[in-house]
Image (cartoon, rainbow, N blue to C red):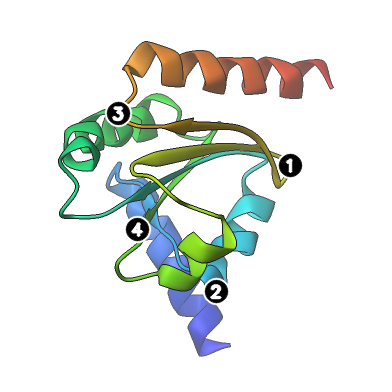
Amino acid sequence: MANLHKNIQIMSTSLENNHPTPLNLGIYADFLEKNPIALVDFWAPWCPPCRALAPTIDGLVGEYKGRVGIGKVNIDQEKPCAEENNIRSLPTLIFYKNGHEKVRLVGNQPIEKIREQLDALLALEKNA
């Protein structure tokens, strides 16, 4: 129970600070369950395209606050989570709707392309 409280606290703190929620295999499913529309960024600190994408992802947290859950997985610290999601290249962005993967983008992406995917998923949610 203490671990669950800690994980919820981490998720809440990340949202308050407009930073993506740090994810690991233990809270990944809960994160997707709590966020009908979600974006997960798989990254590593040694990856230049990942570092270049980070400010974009941080900005999207504030822009989509309350509508999209945005999380990050550091593959160096969370290898099991990366393996479970079949991550082969970095950065990898996975877009989810109701816990199911809908789109996967690999490499540094322009903000417009990420917004396009998020807005399409939100439109589907609104029309459901």
* Picture quarter with the C terminus: top right
Of the pair 126 and 109, the residue shown nearer to us:
109
Measure the C-alpha gap from mark 4 to mark 3: 26 Å
**Residue at mark 2:** 26
**Residue at mark 3:** 108
In the image, residue 64 above or below residue 26: above
Name the kind of residue labelled 1 in the image: Asn
Pointer 4 or 2: first along the chain: 4
Residue at image point 34% right, 44% down = 90
Q: Are discs 4 and 1 less than 8 Å apart at CB?
A: no
Image x and y of residue 1, in percent = 58, 88
Q: Which one is closest to the eye, mark 4 or mark 1?
A: 1
Measure the C-alpha gap from mark 1 to mark 2: 18 Å
Pointer 3 or 2: first along the chain: 2
Q: Which one is closest to the eye, mark 4 or mark 2?
A: 2
In the image, residue 49 above or below residue 116: below
| Left-right relation of 75 to 56 | right
Measure the C-alpha gap from mark 1 to mark 3: 25 Å
Helix, strand, or loop for circle 1?
A: loop
Q: Which mark is residue 98?
A: 1
Name the kind of residue labelled 2 in the image: Gly
Residue at image point 47% right, 61% down = 82
Q: Quadrant of residue 31?
A: bottom right
Of the pair 54 and 105, the residue shown nearer to us:
105
Residue at image point 63% right, 62% down = 30
Image x and y of residue 22, in percent = 37, 59
**Residue at mark 4:** 13
| Left-right relation of 21 to 76 | right
Name the kind of residue labelled 4 in the image: Thr
